[in-house]
Image: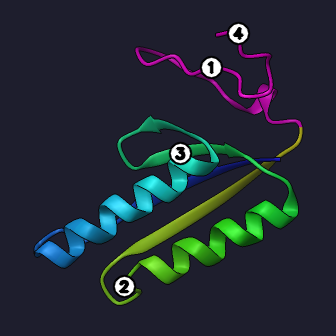
Amino acid sequence: MLILITYDVSTVDSAGRRRLARVAKTCRNFGQRVQYSVFECVVDSTQFRQLQHELKSLIDAKRDSLRFYNLGDKYKSKIIHIGTKESYDVEDPLIL
């Protein structure tokens, strides 16, 4: 399933900047960045629960926010992209 993750982390102090870096790193471990605070992650239900748990433990719920949008398995027809930063299909073979 494709999960779209968006976050807003308060960076008014050094602790907030550390939280922001940790949230981004965790999201990067599960998917690809498509905008500064937006990631697309193709995960199964177990990975999704793990990702939610990890991110929830990183943020300050009184100052930061996370949003998860479950686009499901048939997500390709639900995405329209216009402009720069074309993303790659994480389910296609990767040739190095």
- Name the residue type under label 3: Phe
The image quadrant of residue 65 is: bottom left
How far apart in space, not on screen, are marks 2 and 4 (Cα)? 39 Å
- Name the residue type under label 2: Asp
Nearer-N-terminus badge (2/3): 3
Q: Is residue 10 magenta?
A: no
- At label 2, counting other C-alpha atoms closer than 10 Å, the crowd grade (few under 14, some 14-19, many 20 or more) is some
How far apart in space, not on screen, are marks 2 and 3 (Cα)? 19 Å
How far apart in space, not on screen, are marks 4 and 1 (Cα)? 12 Å
- Say which residue label 3 marks: 39
- Name the residue type under label 4: Ile
**In the drawing, does residue 59 fall left or right of residue 81?**
left
Q: Nearer the viewer's eye, disc 4 or disc 1? A: 4
Is residue 8 positioned above or below 15 on the image? Answer: above
- Magenta span covers which residues? 74-96
- Name the residue type under label 1: Tyr
The image quadrant of residue 56 is: bottom right
- Residue lying farthest bottom? 62
Nearer-N-terminus badge (2/1): 2
Nearer-N-terminus badge (2/4): 2
Nearer-N-terminus badge (3/4): 3
Image quarter in which the C terminus is found: top right
Residue located 63% across and 49% down the image: 30
- Residue lying farthest left? 13
Residue located 13% across and 73% down the image: 14
Nearer-N-terminus badge (1/3): 3
Q: Position of residue 83 (x, y in %)?
A: 43, 14
